[in-house]
Image: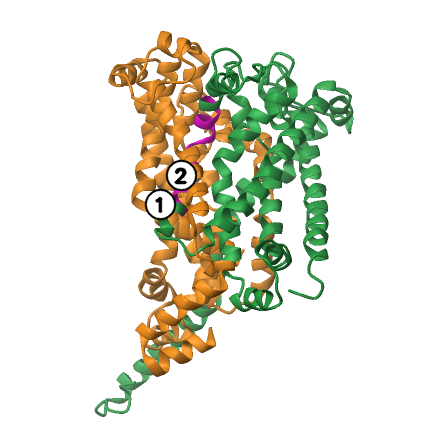
Chain colours: A green, B orange
Amino acid sequence: MSVKSAPPKPQKAKADAERELARRTRRNAWDQKLSPYLYISPFFLLFALVGLFPLAYTAFVSVHDWNLIGGKGDFVGLENYQQVLQQPLFWKGLRNTFSIFLLSSVPQVLIGLFLAAMLDANLRAKTFWRMGVLLPYVVMPVAVGMIFNKIFADQSGMANALLAKVGIEPIAWHADVLASHIAIATMVDFRWTGYTTLILLAGMQAIPNDLYEAAVVDGAGRWRSFRSITIPSLKPTIIFVVITSTIGGLQIFDEPRVFNQTGNGGSDRQWMTVTMYLYELGWGAQKSFGRASAVAWILFIIILIIGAINFKITQRISGTDSKGGK
Amino acid sequence: MSSIGAVEQTAGKGAARYAQRRRDRATGVGSNRRGGWVTYTILTVVLLISFYPIYYTFLLASSDAQTIAQNPIPSLIPEGNFIDNVTRVINSDIKFWQALWNSVIVAVITSISVVLFATLAGFSFAKLRFRGRRALLVFVIATMAVPTQLGVVPLFILMSNLGWTGKLVAVIVPGMVTAFGVFWMTQYFEETLPFELIEAARVDGCSMIRTFWHVALPAAKPAAAMLALFTFVASWTSFFWPFIVLGSTNPTLPVSLQLLQASYFKDFALIMAGVVLATIPLILLFIVAGKQLVSGIMAGAVKG
């Protein structure tokens, strides 16, 4: 500091300077102490207000008679849960959600692995190919749903026209339960497979080449080294992909909502998902926020359980192939 | 790699590159496998699958209802009705301009806000020492897996109590922070911003906030830009919450697009013209910044 080189000052000025320095040091100490909390507080405050609080408060709403217009009513205990669980429509929604989720996420991870292995090669114009697989990601799910609603139209749809060319009978993509689930799973995978592929590709590129070289020396073929080196090394990445797709997949709403013009999930509710059911309870004819909250809370618990199971299974599957090799 | 490194040291960069290339050809597995024609063919097919539905939408948007009904597989050459159909979308009662403007406002504000708050918090988590830091950071990471969408009912109650239903602020405020953003910026600062730089600024008499503004923020630019991109895309494409809280009176693009299908469900030329209009902005963004999106996803994956 400049204290040393400063010319001699009168006594008063020196005292002032000392006081100023002390003040600054004190302020500095506070700055150092408080700033970290100050900087993280906007996130925590906002997230608590618009993220965590509503989720927790859902449990409170779910044990009350609560109407969209009338507001809060009596405490009813678990009655909302009982009523929801007695509705065949809820179980149908749950079945549809799981069916669509499995039909989309299993092929998505498998195709993603395959494409990532393709992209992992030493390619010309790498970025071009990577951007190519990612392109559908920028199309909004509602738009994807509307495009594929037309492609999978039961009459004069492109999918059936193509099938007819190879001699396959037309499929009732909307009327049939399984076919409608396949159509919606296709939409999900159209938008997300490229994204998943890039995540898996990043994981693959982090695998050290020495491992592959050692495998070649040991006489392993391409498939063998993919199974014994690539897959086990990708374990954390695959777990990450599976868990994120579970959280998203079980809440699916956009694509099935626009798979027909009324948004009711089909004449027989054959593709109505749990989140669509939640919406219908809360904002449809019933306007029952209590029951909608019960559905939300049930789905939340299901997601937690499935997440945990996923974690266990993925760990085991990708663990068996790699005895000691990590 | 070590032997290649040795080549580089003893014989220069060109020789190292040559050695690397020879080795690639020899091993032929993993990242070093050279792409053969099979790989290129498969990737070309994938590219066509990625691209075709978007082009298909444009083909239908340039056609008319009758032609579409008669030809389930549209001819690859667009017809001349695109401008006409676009005009009809704009003149329909889905409030196209308002929806477009709303989408822009929401996406821009949430992107700026997410980046600002995530950068602040990330700087604090990565570079400042304070009590409870680890626990709070673990909490942030854990919340990334929380399906906050399931809190819609109380969130809606909150918004109606505030009188915000039907107003953009009801969509903006819940989108202003993301746990992912904080995690992302924390990671970036931890890896790239040296402590020495912060200490130097502090010794020079910078307050914390000035250190953040003049040292951390400029250093965070690449990661912040990527975070802004992803937030923009997420906001532009989001449907569930805007659909619930805004409704058809003051819609964002996905909400009004869905209205188009609900009210003109037989007129596919019109519907697809709407889809094209809603998609074009992000396609443009993709052309400009697709590379950043790709590397952003790949960077996030390695860390996550």
User: Is B141 in front, or is B84?
Assistant: B84
User: Is B292 in front, or is B180?
Assistant: B292
Spatial CA span between label 1 and label 2: 8 Å
The span picked out in magenta is A130-146
| Residue behind mark 2 | A135
Residue located at (44% from left, 20% from top): B258
| Residue behind mark 1 | B290
User: Is A54 in front, or is A202?
Assistant: A202
Q: Is residue B172 above or below residue A280?
A: below
* Horizontal and vertical percent position of residue A265: 59, 18
> Horizontally, is B179 left or right of B209 in the view?
right
Residue A71 appears in the picture as rendered? no
> Horizontally, is A123 left or right of A7 in the view?
right
| Host chain of mark 1 | B
* Horizontal and vertical percent position of residue B217: 35, 60
Secondary structure at badge 2 equals helix
- Location of the N terminus of chain A by quadrant is bottom left
Residue B11, picture quadrant = bottom left
